[in-house]
C-alpha cells in the first residue's frame, strides 16, 4: 500500500531513528572499550547515557502518536556501525586507533543530526509542537557530542602525530648510530 501522507513519512522516519538509537546503545560501550584515551572513553560513556535518553524521548513521541516504535531497521546505521567495527578491527597504534574511532563516531553523529533535523522539520509542519521540542533537545545533544569529538580529535590527533614523529626520530637516530659504529 502506497504511503501518501507526510504523517506516514514522519512516523516511518521516527521508527528509523528509534532503531538507529537502539543500535547505538549496543555499540557505544564497544567504542568506549576500544578507545585508549580516558577522555574519549568518558565521552562515549556520556553519549551512551544521552542515547538512552534519546530512545526514551522517541518512545514518548510514539506514545503520543499511539504508534509502536518498532518495525523499521535503519540500514544507514547498520552500515555506519559495520564500518566502525571494521575500523576497530584494524591494527592501529593506540593514538591512531583513537583518531580512527573518532572519525567513525563523527560519521554517526552527522547521520543522526541530518535525521533529527529532517524529522524535526516534519514535526513543525505537522503542528507537533511538543515533538519539535523533544526532537530539538536531542538534535542539540547530537551537535554537542559532535563538538566534543572534534575538540578531542584535535588533542588525540596531535598526540598521534607527535608519537609518529618521535618514533621516526628514534628510528633515524638508531640507524645513524649503527652506521657510526660500523664506520669506527
Image: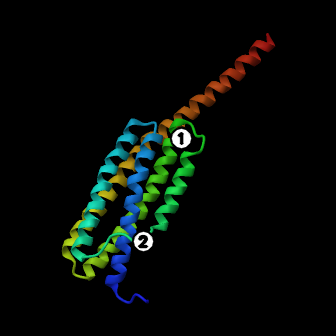
Going by the image, does 57 lie left or right of 47?
left
**C-alpha gap between disc 1 and disc 2:** 35 Å
User: Which picture quadrant has residue 23?
Assistant: bottom left
- For image coordinates 34% across by 53% down, the residue present is 145
The mark that comes first in sequence, 1 or 2, is 2
Front residue of this view, candidates 10 and 154: 10
Q: Nearer the viewer, mark 1 or mark 2?
A: 2
Which part of the image, by quadrant, shows the N terminus?
Answer: bottom left
Where does residue 79 sit, x and y in percent of width and height? 52, 62
Q: Is residue 61 left or right of residue 149?
A: left
Residue, disc 2: 72
User: Which mark identifies residue 141?
Assistant: none
Determine whether 14 is above or below 108 in the image: below
- Residue at left offset 25%, top offset 63%: 57
Q: Which residue is mark 1?
A: 96
Quadrant of the frame with the C terminus? top right
For the question of whether residue 28 can be seen, the reply is yes
Indicate left or right for 103 with 180 as reference: left
Viewer-proximal residue among 117 and 9:
9
Quarter holding residue 109: bottom left
Residue at 29%, 53% in the rendered image:
50
Amino acid at each position: 500500500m502506497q504511503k501518501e501522507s507526510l504523517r506516514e513519512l514522519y512516523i516511518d522516519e521516527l521508527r528509523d531513528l528509534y532503531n538507529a538509537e537502539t543500535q547505538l546503545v549496543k555499540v557505544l560501550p564497544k567504542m568506549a572499550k576500544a578507545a585508549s584515551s580516558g577522555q574519549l572513553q568518558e565521552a562515549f560513556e556520556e553519549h551512551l547515557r544521552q542515547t538512552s535518553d534519546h530512545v526514551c524521548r522517541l518512545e514518548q513521541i510514539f506514545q503520543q502518536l499511539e504508534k509502536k516504535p518498532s518495525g523499521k531497521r535503519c540500514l544507514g546505521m547498520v552500515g555506519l556501525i559495520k564500518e566502525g567495527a571494521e575500523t576497530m578491527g584494524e591494527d592501529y597504534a593506540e593514538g591512531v586507533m583513537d583518531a580512527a574511532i573518532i572519525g567513525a563516531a563523527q560519521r554517526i553523529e552527522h547521520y543522526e543530526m541530518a535525521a533529527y533535523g529532517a524529522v524535526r522539520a516534519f514535526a513543525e509542519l505537522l503542528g507537533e509542537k511538543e515533538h519539535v521540542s523533544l526532537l530539538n533537545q536531542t538534535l542539540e545533544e547530537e551537535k554537542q557530542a559532535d563538538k566534543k569529538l572534534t575538540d578531542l580529535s584535535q588533542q588525540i590527533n596531535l598526540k598521534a602525530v607527535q608519537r609518529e614523529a618521535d618514533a621516526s626520530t628514534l628510528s633515524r637516530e638508531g640507524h645513524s648510530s649503527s652506521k657510526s659504529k660500523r664506520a669506527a
